[in-house]
Image (cartoon, helix red, strand yellow):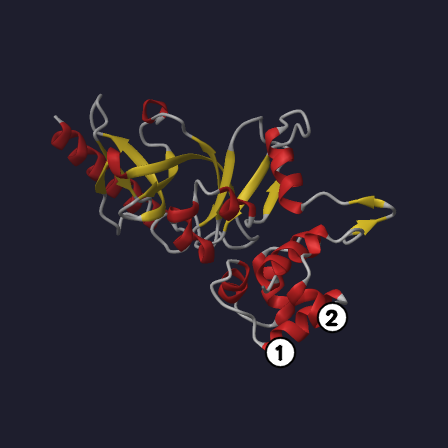
Amino acid sequence: MSYAGKNLKFIRKQREWTQEEMAQQLQIKRSLVGAYEEERAEPRLEVQEAICALFNLSLEEFLFQDLSQRAGFGQEGGSSSNAYLDRRRAMKMDKSASIVPIVPFVPVKAAAGYLAGYADPEFLDELNTFTLPMLAPGDYRAFEIIGDSMLPTPSGSVIVGEKVANLKEVKNSNTYIVVSNADGVVYKRIITNDDHQEKLTLLSDNPLYEPYQVNSQDIVEIWKAVYVIQKAGAQPMWDVDQLAGVVNSLQDKISTLKRTMN
């Protein structure tokens, strides 16, 4: 029996590395690290040798010994270190451990898998995290956005959102990260169409994009935008005429929506 997959996952978490960081160390694709750890594939010999060199192991130890059960493995200063995921989960569960909320970050490259993994602890624990001292206690997540549909918020911005537990909490015309089965992760303004909220209208800040509707049943998560993080100098410049055009276009669209709702 080969312990290659189990051992790779164990020693990676002992180093507190994500799968992406491990892949960079081994100069392979992140998807291969996932396949090895889930035992959907066996590491090639050159990958095994690279792992052994990186962690100071023999091939026999890596392939045929359960390193998680080996006495002393991963110990530092005489005390055994806790498993990486156990520490992170304990920190998340213990609200008194940190006054500052921990914010998981969903980059664009992880957005495709987010719809399937948003409720999976294993997927979420692979995400990098950060903290913002100005955040009040709550459940937060950060999403990288790409594209120009929400200009003047530039492409590449990071939207920090607070979890919306109920559609009744959605405020008309505010900005949200909306996760739906049809569209995945999008950043839009939400226009509520009726008291029952069976459908929501998603509106872009860029008037070149038409608003569209989504069924409430199709939405799996909503995060209210509380902060926008962007690179210095990334804010696009608008002249007065452009701003006037944007305002007029938005007013026309809102008027049209109101007439449609009525």
Question: For the view shown, which residue lies furthest in the front direction?
Answer: 1
* Type of amino acid at the residue the image marks with label 1: Glu
| Left/right of residue 66 with respect to residue 159 in the rendered view | right
Dot 2, how many residues are within 10 Å of its Cα: few (below 14), some (14-19), or many (20+)?
few
* Type of amino acid at the residue the image marks with label 2: Ser
Q: Counting residues from the N terminus, which is met first, the one under dot 2 or under dot 1? A: 1
Q: Where is residue 105 in the image (x, y as percent from the top left)?
A: 53, 46
Residue under the point 74% across and 53% down? 70
- Pointer 1 residue: 46
Q: In 3D space, how far apart are the residues under numbered discs 2 and 1 (Cα atoms)?
A: 13 Å
Instruction: Please determine whether, in this image, residue 170 is positioned above or below residue 42.
Output: above
Quadrant in which the C terminus appears: top left
| Left/right of residue 100 with respect to residue 199 in the rendered view | right
Is residue 229 visible from the viewing direction of this image? no
Q: What element carries label 2?
A: loop
| Left/right of residue 156 with respect to residue 185 in the rendered view | right
Q: Are marks 2 and 1 in contact (CB under 8 Å)?
A: no
Is residue 55 visible from the viewing direction of this image? yes
Q: Position of residue 13 (x, y in %)?
A: 65, 52
Image quadrant of residue 147? bottom left
Image quadrant of residue 3? bottom right
- Pointer 2 residue: 58
| Foreground: disc 2 or disc 1 | 2
Dot 1, how many residues are within 10 Å of its Cα: few (below 14), some (14-19), or many (20+)?
few
Quadrant in which the N terminus appears: bottom right
Instruction: Please determine whether, in this image, residue 207 is positioned above or below residue 43.
Output: above
Count of numbered circles in the view: 2
Question: For the view shown, which residue lies furthest in the bottom direction?
Answer: 46
Q: Which numbered circle lies on residue 259?
A: none
Instruction: Please determine whether, in this image, residue 90 is positioned above or below residue 11.
Output: above
Residue under the point 61% across and 67% down? 24
Residue under the point 46% across and 58% down? 109
